[in-house]
Structure formats: C-alpha cells, structure tokens
Amino acid sequence: MNPLNHVAIIMDGNGRWGLKYKNSRNAGHKAGLKTVEKIIKATIKNKIKFLTLYAFSTENWRRPQKEIAFLFSLLENFLSNRLNELHNQNIRIKIIGKKSFSQRLNKLLNLSEKKTLKNDRLQINLALNYGSKSELIDAFKKIKKNKENINERNLSRNLQTKNIPDPDLLIRTGNTKRLSNFLLWQVAYSEIFFEKKLWPAFNENDYKRIIKEYKSIKRNFGKI
Ligand code: IPE
Ligand code: IPE
Ligand code: MG
C-alpha cells in the first residue's frame, strides 16, 4: 500500500455546474466551497498531512471582473469566518502564489498563515494567484542572485513549496485533462487522476475511491 502524504487538487468545474443547475457561474463557486469543506474533513479523516488546493491561477485574472470579485469575496468570508475553527482543528494554512491582493485580503492571508504556523495535523496550501511558470522563474532568479548551483535540491528549495513534499496524488475534477500551470515541477512523479465530475458534485465517496485506487498503484520511480 502506497503511503499518502500529500494530495493536490485542481478544483475545476464550478462555472459549468453553476450554469447548469443555478443559471449562474458564481452559484457554482459558492457550491464549490461546500465541497472544499467536505474534502478538508475527509483529508483529516484519512490522516493525510498536506492538501494543496488550486483556487486561483495567474491566468484566472483574464476572467470578468465581476467573477473575480465574487471569488475573492467568497475566500475572504470563508477565511474570516472559519479561521478560528481551522486553527482549533490544528490545521496550518499556507498560501502559495503571489499575495498581491487588496490590503485587507493580504492582511487576512498573512494573519491566517501566522496564526496557524505551528499547527501540525494538516497543512492546507492554498494556491492563490499561483502559476508554476512564474514560480520557476522566480526560483531561478533567487538561485542566480545567491550564486547557488543549479541542481534539483536547490531548485526545490527556492520554490514556494519548499519544505512541502511533492504531491503523491493529483486530482483534477471537471472532465478536463490538463495541468493549467499547476505545480509543473512538483508533480513529476505524482499519480494523476482526471475526474469527470464537476467540483461542486465531487464528494467524499469519490475521494475515497481515488485514494483506494492510488494506494494499490505500483509506483516505480524509474525502477522495476
Ligand atoms: C474552477 O472552476 C474554479 C476556479 C478557476 C476559480 P471554473 O470556474 O474554472 O469552472 P469551469 O471550468 O468554468 O466550469
Ligand atoms: C484551473 O482551472 C485553475 C483553478 C482550478 C484554480 P481553469 O478553469 O482556470 O483552467 P483552464 O483555463 O480551463 O485550463
Ligand atoms: Mg475551469
């Protein structure tokens, strides 16, 4: 049975779900947040130590301003309402991506990270304004500035995911088979599951089924 330490999720399909069932993409984002809560619970239950959630990509700024504003208001409400609860559950929050939002949101994100820094039951990495290409470029720039050697260890250490083990399992919901600029370096050896279901429809049983299948895979890492 494969150990499962880190699950990364591309939570895709909110907009389509919202349009189909509620005639509004934003209603899909709202429903998607409920799935986030369910999956956090299930992750704790399965004693998984790291959960990375792709919430907003560097490319998502190309969406209509109204949708972007709604997404960030959802996030802000979620964090301000749930931060204490997450903290009491011994969950650590870490943001990956560039924190260049409104002053209020930046402050809330910094507070969330600082308050939960010592928690060790589950670490949730929230990928916000995250893009793997820009993360890699920044890492190379830091290596150059510090006159370090270019090698795998130094590259990993200069990514925003430093100190986080690479994902064992990557799940993308929403019936699309692409990575959309997510953790390109880090998923080099992850087991990848593309799920047909849209994120708001994804549930604990789907998650359980994937975990079960993941555990039975023969992971070679180049060996036989
Ligand atoms: C993913 O769902 C959530 C974000 C990108 C924030 P989408 O909004 O991409 O949903 P679809 O793919 O348009 O259905
Ligand atoms: C990826 O989904 C980003 C997030 C889930 C946050 P997108 O819906 O933005 O991806 P593309 O644009 O269809 O590749
Ligand atoms: Mg999408």
Image (spheres, rainbow, N blue to C red):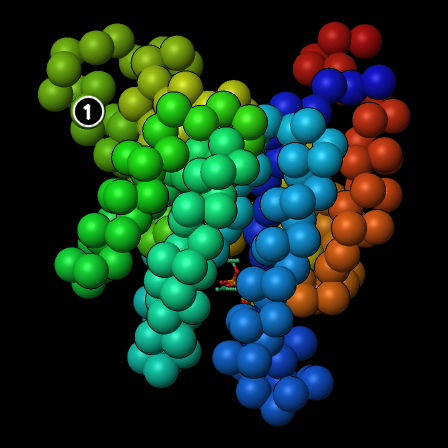
Q: Is residue 149 left or right of residue 212?
A: left
Residue that numbered label 1 is attached to: 142
Q: Is residue 185 visible?
A: no
At a point 60% along the width and 55% down the height, the residue shown is 36
- Residue type, numbered disc 1: Lys
At 33% from the left and 14% from the top, the residue drawn is 154
Residue lying at 87% horizontally and 25% vertically, measured from the top left: 216
Residue 209 lies, in percent from the top left, at: 85, 43
Q: Is residue 86 above or below residue 106?
A: above
In the visual, does 173 lie left or right of 59? Answer: right
Residue 162 appears anywhere in the view: yes
| Secondary structure type for disc 1 | helix
Question: Residue 1, image x and y in percent?
Answer: 84, 18
Q: Position of residue 58 (x, y in %)?
A: 35, 56
The image quadrant of residue 7 is top right
Name of the residue lying farthest toward the left: 145
Q: On the picture, is 122 further left or further right than 2?
A: left
**Mark 1: few/some/many CA within 10 Å (<14, 14-19, 20+):** some
Query: Looking at the picture, does residue 166 appear above or below residue 92?
Result: above
Give the residue at x 27% y 28%: 139
The image position of residue 9, as x and y in percent, is: 60, 46
Quadrant of the picture in which ligand 1 is shown: bottom right
* Quadrant of the rendering where the C terminus is positioned: top right
Most foreground residue, 91 or 72: 91
